[in-house]
Image (spheres, rainbow, N blue to C red):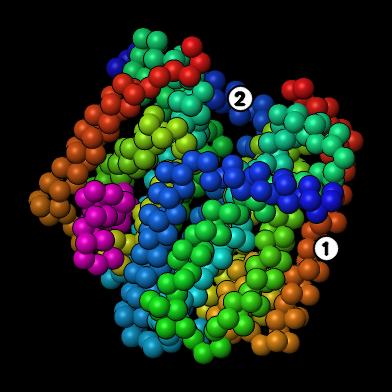
Amino acid sequence: MTRYLRLYAHFVRFSLSRAMEFRFDFFFRVFMDGLWNVVNLLFFWLLFRHTTILGDWTFDQMVVFAAGFFIVDAVQMTFLSNNFWWFPHFVNRGDLDYYLVRPVSPLFFLSLREFAANSFLNLVIACGILVWSIARFPAPLPASAVLLYLALIALGCFLFYCVHMIFLIPVFWIHQGGGLRDLFWSFERYFSRPHRLFRGVVRLVLVTILPFGLMASVPAQVLFEGLTPALALHVAAVTACAFGFLAWFWRRGLRAYSSASS
Amino acid sequence: MSPRVFWSVLSVEARKRLGYRADFWVQSFVGFVAEFGLVWFLWRAMYVESGRVAMGGLDLHGMVLYQVGVVLLGKLVRGPEIEGAVSQDIYDGSLSRYLLYPARYPVFKYAQHLGSLLPATVQLVLFGVWFPIALELPEGAGPLSLLAAVPAVLAGNLLYFLMSYGLQSVAFWAENVWSLLVALRLVTTILGGAMVPLAMFPGWARDALWFTPFPYLYAFPVDTLLGQVGPLAWARGIAVTLLWCSVTAAAGRAVFRRGTLQYSGVGM
């Protein structure tokens, strides 16, 4: 564990020094991430000009929910997105070889090697929006509920990672990651909507097979309504299943990998 | 560039795009269903929970039609701009090759860009034919509005390409302009009426937005397709789109020219 933490500290140091070399990109990305937050808040503001309630939530509740998915997004943009982007290229070009021969988990290496320092600033902004949204919330929110909310958001980040990787791994067989990446982005938009907007099978899918509803929406529900034992068990079971499936799928993918370069 | 060469570049790109068929079909079908589900549930909840019959002059049926139109036509307007073909040429030095070709670089890239629209066109045809069957079309929509939408989409596509071209030319100075392309998509999506119809914006914002190029990317082509634009408004819309095209083309050309003065063909 200590070895992995030390290794990750090296990843961060290399990424930081590289980010400082590409300053234009640094500021462009901060701008883009900030703009994404603004566009989403503007979207909900426009909707709430025509309704007082949406997905069982008021505008104030929706802003707290939005802050939650800003954090999940900022975490994935900071720690994961660059790595996700390169993963299909590594598989197709045979560059995966370099990761497989190293004495650390290749999944760890491939998932966390690049740290986006520019998006880290956005993570700070997203946390600021969360503090602001809770401070302006008309009813008092107990500290224990906020802590539980943050823990569930952290779990949501982990689920996001698992689901995204599961969408990328088929590149071992189909060799073209573009369509699956676009497909994930189509589904990913579900995590930025309250899960109670959806009905029937779709809602069931969003809290089980494609658990986008558990990443930010269910944590916000827990913040406003509290956590029941059944819901806690459900979230734990889905997270365990997602990680278990990822680990199994990853091993199957590696078996299918044929190393294009050697 | 002669029309024959333009067509040849376009068709090569189109064939390339359909090379990975499994990828294409998965993205086409599941992607469309995912986007349709998002639209349907969001707007259904909006109408049911607010208890309102109309928003921005549209009932639920009209809103779903508008949003499906945005999903299908939006892909044709944007194309795969996010891939950053121009900026990639600048980074990896392959721009040098194009500068030697007896063809103008932006025209060559535009031919490739049009060719890359084939998957989105197939998707439009596949799902668009179900439009009149599954969803009752509004009054005014029909073959004539479909015909009128073609130039509106083409003009919108050219405008988006030219906006993206100018931004990608910043790659002569910056190391990565992908973020700028995402920012362009975000701004055009919200201000062009793709996320929420412009009629739902406050009056002052709606009026101001029609003085910008953004509504001509999504709102205008979709409204045209749905037969909500009269002949005069249509002609004015096309003319304004082309005017914005000439403005963005001039800006893009200026940036590109300045960039080529300091271009050193890295990687060749």
- Reply yes or no: does residue A168 show up in magenta: no
Residue B14's label in the rendered image is none
Residue A244, x across and y down, in percent: 21, 33
> Crowding at label 1, few (<14), some or many (≥20) Cα neighbours within 10 Å?
some
Quarter of the figure that contains the N terminus of chain A: top left
> What secondary structure is marked by label 1?
helix
Q: Is residue A164 left or right of residue A38?
A: left
Q: Amino acid at mark 1?
A: Ser
Relative to A110, is A131 above or below? below
Q: Which residues are magenta?
A: A198-224
Label 2 – label 1 distance at C-alpha: 38 Å
| The quadrant where residue A55 appears | bottom left
> What secondary structure is marked by label 2?
helix
Q: Amino acid at mark 2?
A: Arg
Q: Which chain is mark 1 on? A: B
| The quadrant where residue B77 appears | bottom right
Q: Which chain is mark 2 on? A: A
Q: Residue at x 70, y 81 (%)?
A: B234
Q: Residue at x 39, y 88 (%)?
A: B53
Q: Residue at x 68, y 65 (%)?
A: B154
| The quadrant where residue B84 appears | top right
Can you name the residue that lies furthest to the left here? A229
Can residue B96 be seen at all in this image of the molecule? yes
Q: Residue at x 34, y 18 (%)?
A: A105
- Please tell me whether the stretch drawn in magenta is mainly helix, strand or loop: helix
Dots 2, 1 in contact, CB < 8 A: no
Residue B106, x across and y down, in percent: 79, 48
Relative to B203, is A256 above or below? above
- Reply yes or no: does residue A211 show up in magenta: yes
Q: Determine which residue is flagged by label 1.
A: B246
Residue A18's label in the rendered image is 2
